[in-house]
Amino acid sequence: MVAARAAYVVQWWPEYWAPVSVSPANALQILDIRDGGWNLWAGLLVAAFWAAWSCRSHVTLKRGVLQSLGVGAFILMAAYALRNWVEPPTSSLPSLTLVNAAAQPTDLRSYGGQPLVINLWASWCPPCKREMPVLAQAQKDHPGVRFIWINQGEDAAAVLRYLQSMPLPPAQVLLDPEQLAGQHWQQRSLPSTYFYDANGRLRSTRTGELSRASLSEQLRIIAPPTQAP
């Protein structure tokens, strides 16, 4: 687990370093595994070497451990290859008409044609509050990606009070007092974030708090960085 986390931090080091350069206290984010940042392959590789080293003086045990590791590695690689080979069922943007913070009706499908990040949140949810500045900054840093914040179950007054302390684009904050969006995506907890590509296909989901690193990882899926010719 330590190796999987360390490899992930190294992989996304610029995203972890940016907050630390502002305040050294933000270094604790490196240890905050709630963002779901793990490098699976690095963790498995270190686990395999550690298991083989621990059994080096026991020939019989070593043979069994290596055989088990080989079978496990084969299953993981086969599952990974199958996941990329089999085309998953497409999930398009739902036809939901909600009201934005500017009191204008908005159909989610009107945001099609561009990479889209949909975040389900509530003002009483601590992880939602912690990740909100990260999402807001990402919207500024990635103008080609549209971020939509759909409030779940609260009235307009509560949402507007919250927006006084966390300024977000009013047209991109939608009110969903009946939690229709949560029902569509079968939301299990808050915050929940859904990542759509420019073709309107759901490419990834994330339940739980996002950090700069884990958000950047997801954005790379729906909006890969362009390379100069």
Image (cartoon, rainbow, N blue to C red):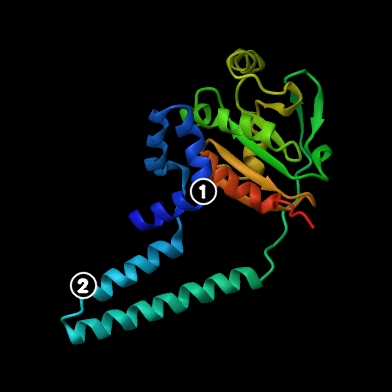
Task: Label 2, secondary structure: give it.
Answer: helix
Task: From this view, report whether residue 229 is shown above or below residue 182.
Answer: below
* Res 188 visible: no
Classed neighbour count for the residue bearing mark 1: other residues with Cα under 10 Å, few (<14), some (14–19), many (≥20):
some
Q: In the image, which is nearer the foreground, mark 1 or mark 2? A: 1
Q: Residue at x 48, y 40 (%)?
A: 16
Disc marking residue 54:
2
Q: Identify residue type, mark 2.
A: Ser
Q: Identify residue type, mark 1.
A: Trp
Q: Residue furthest front?
A: 229
Q: Residue at x 81, y 43 (%)?
A: 112
**Would you name the residue on which mark 1 appears?**
12
Residue 185: x percent and y percent? Answer: 63, 45
* Res 86 visible: yes
- Looking at this view, is 195 or 48 the one in front? 48
Label 1 and label 2: CA atoms lie apart by 31 Å
